Amino acid sequence: MRLAFRDALFAVRRAPLLSVLSVMTIAFSLFAFALFGLVALNIKRALESVEERVEIRAFVADGTPVEEVTNAAMEIGRYREVQNVTIVTQEQALARARRELGEFSDVFEEGVLPSSIDIKLVPGARDPRSVGAVASRVRTISFVDDVRYGEEWITQLYKLRNIAGVTGLALGLAFAIVAVIIIGATIRMTVLARAKEIGIMRLVGATDAFVRSPFLIEGFAKGILGGMLALILTWVASLTLEHYLNFSAMFFDSRLVLFGLAGGALIGLFGSGFAVGRHLRRV
């Protein structure tokens, strides 16, 4: 193993330009993939933040006793799809309308707006079908005059989410395939540059495992360095976008950072193994 490490280090010193080219190719290929992943992650967060605003509002008929409204709210709160339930009185509804629509505050008068039961749903139950099912159940309550939940808005939101998910998966796979092809070609150039060395090692009786070891170590190290450089470039790009577009972008968490480094290492490892294995079958 020590000999394999020494040979790998010697190979890098002997051809520094080719080694730098390999690292840069891995870095920029992973950078393109990571940049797309970062955009997809922020789109997902934006859609989730919009999704959190999904709620059902059941308007209560005038004159309904407070006890009935409270009991109904407690019953609705026991639905498995419901996260929390809030009773909004007429006074609270008036104050909210004047606060949210300040320019029309003079239009609203006492007693104009009805009281309501506002229902927030748990994550995973905010799709059109689940929201519609809860709204239908609430609509059967005798003193509920009307139920609103922005049906068309929720439908469009989920269409956008599904389109973004499918498009993101397809483009992500395309970026990954292109990155692997480019990286594989670069690593193969490194192996071909040392073809004479491999031939001599085979002539003196070196086993395939002995020949592969330095290449695998070199590929693993290049993959780690390429992954680290890709993450640094992605971080700089994220900060630049935040600065010029004036918005707070979400960056990868520690789990995704480790996944990126592991991905770079595996690409370098398997790319080198595949390239040198292919060459060994020819000599």
Image: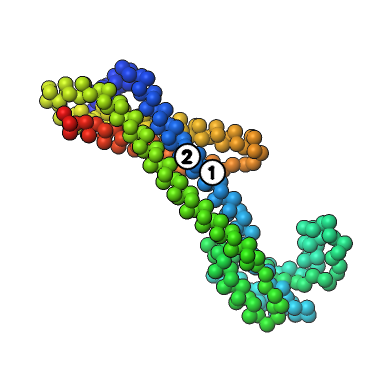
Residue at 21% x, 21% y: name it.
Answer: 196
Whether residue 206 appears in this view of the structure is yes
Q: Which quadrant: the C terminus? A: top left
Percent x, y for residue 62? 78, 78
**Element type where label 1 sits in the image:** helix
Q: Which residue is mark 1?
A: 39
Q: Nearer the viewer, residue 176 or 135?
A: 176
Residue 221 located left or right of residue 63: left
Along the viewing direction, whichever of 58 and 16 lies nearer the viewer: 16
Q: Residue at x 26, y 26 (%)?
A: 192
* Mark 1 residue type: Val
Looking at the figure, which quarter contains the N terminus? top left
Is 10 located above or below residue 164 in the figure?
above
Q: On the rendered structure, is 147 left or right of 99?
A: left
The residue sitting at the top extreme is 14
Q: Which residue is mark 2?
A: 34
Label 2: state its secondary structure: helix
Residue drawn at point x = 41 percent, y = 46 percent: 173
Residue 244 position within the rendered picture, expressed as x and y whole percent measured from the top left: 64, 35
Give residue 208's position: percent from left, percent from top: 17, 31
- Closer to the camera in the image, 82 or 103: 103
Q: Position of residue 115 (x, y in %)?
A: 75, 72
> Is mark 1 in CB contact (under 8 Å) with mark 2?
no
Report the residue that reaches farthest toward the bottom. 142
Residue 159 located left or right of residue 226: right
- Say whether disc 1 or disc 2 marks the residue closer to the N-terminus: 2
Q: How many marks?
A: 2
Q: Measure the alpha-carbon separation of dots 1 and 2.
A: 9 Å
Residue 153: quadrant of the picture: bottom right
The residue carrying pointer 2 sits among few (fewer than 14), some (14 to 19) or many (20 or more) residues within 10 Å by Cα, namely many
